Amino acid sequence: MDSVTPHFLTAALYQFVDLPDFVALREPLQSLCDANGVRGMLLLAPEGINGTIAGEPQGVHTVLAWLRSDARFAALQHKEALAERMPFYRMRVRLKREIVTLGVPGLNPARNAGTYVKPGDWNALIDAPDVVVVDTRNDYEVGIGTFERAINPHTKSFAEFPAWVAQQSQPGGVLAGKPKVAMFCTGGIRCEKSTAFLRSQGFDEVYHLEGGILKYLETVPEESSRWQGDCFVFDERVSVGHGLVRGPHQLCRSCRMPLGEAELQSPHYVPGVSCPYCHGTRTPEQERALAERERQMQLAAQRGQEHIGARQPGSVARPSTQDGKADAGHPEDAA
């Protein structure tokens, strides 16, 4: 069978920048994306922009060029990946209080983030015995891969991170005495904000991995790597390994958890309906609806058509039954 040439370009981006007019940017940005066939999700907030978009390369580059034409976004960086099919179902530009939700008023990562550490210097930092290494991602992400020596805060959302810091700053906690702290996340946004938070709590020596795990996996040779496992990403690849090679994980279309080989072999895994993480949490009616949705998706795929989110002639687009991860890429962390 002939291989399929990747046709779509995915661009993940974020930038912390003072954006008092963020509301006024929404409509022109939405219109520009729609006019260029670009889909995904972008978040705008007073603290900046965050999200992932995809489309024909020319369309994606048109949107990026439009953003960078604003002097405040002149230094905007993005990460690219190629896809064989459009990974998103629609385009949404959303207004938020924060581009990544921590829930701590007054933080300004654009001015107060910790010290950036380039991927080539990261090993030496986290190998140092006096450095506490913290994974700022959610528990399900940490579960499929992380750095050696990294502490898992076991958070279900980024907004739980401040409470973990408060707890671990007490006597006997891993952050007691305000040690040197090195933090990391998928693409950089969460650790950039979390280092600003730690600095606001009196931590003086706080570091974070520039470009996140993805830049490390892209640039650091596997034989020199301190990374173990795969890295969860918020797009159709689900996970990647060294060299950003696509990993073996799939998403449960019911609960959106990443599934490895063991979960896929579980008797509780029913494609589109359930997995070991969500088995037994749906009513019989919900399971029948999920099974029917999966059947319709498979039929659409056989016909080479889209199913979820596709506009039918004369119809009005409705919100997807899935959460943000499936609907337009989950921009909690730029990938």
Image: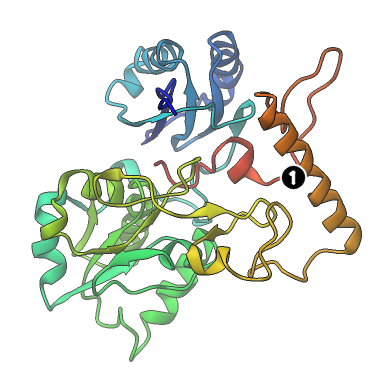
Using the rendered view, name the quadrant where residue 243 is placed: top left
As drawn, 171 above or below 132: below
User: Which residue is pictured at 47% across the width and 48% down the height?
Assistant: 238
Please, what is the three-letter code of the amino acid marked with disc 1?
Answer: Glu
Answer whether residue 210 is visible to the viewer in this image.
Answer: no
User: Which residue is pictured at 91% across the width and 57% down the height?
Assistant: 285
Using the rendered view, name the quadrant where residue 1 is placed: top left
Label count reads: 1
- Categorize mark 1 by other alpha carbons within 10 Å: few (<14), some (14-19), many (20+): some
Q: Is mark 1 on a helix, strand or loop?
A: helix
Q: Nearer the viewer, residue 12 or 74?
A: 12
Q: Which residue lies furthest to the right in this view?
A: 285
Q: Nearer the viewer, residue 107 or 268?
A: 268
> x and y percent of residue 109 in the render?
34, 46
As drawn, 4 above or below 214: above
User: Which residue is pictured at 52% across the width and 27% down the height?
Assistant: 85
> x and y percent of residue 116 in the render?
19, 49
Q: Which residue lies furthest to the bottom in this view?
A: 172
User: Which residue is pictured at 43% across the width and 25% down the height?
Assistant: 4
Q: Which of 105 and 38 is in front in this view?
A: 38
Answer whether residue 114 is visible to the viewer in this image.
Answer: yes
**Residue marked by disc 1:** 294
> x and y percent of residue 155 in the render?
50, 69
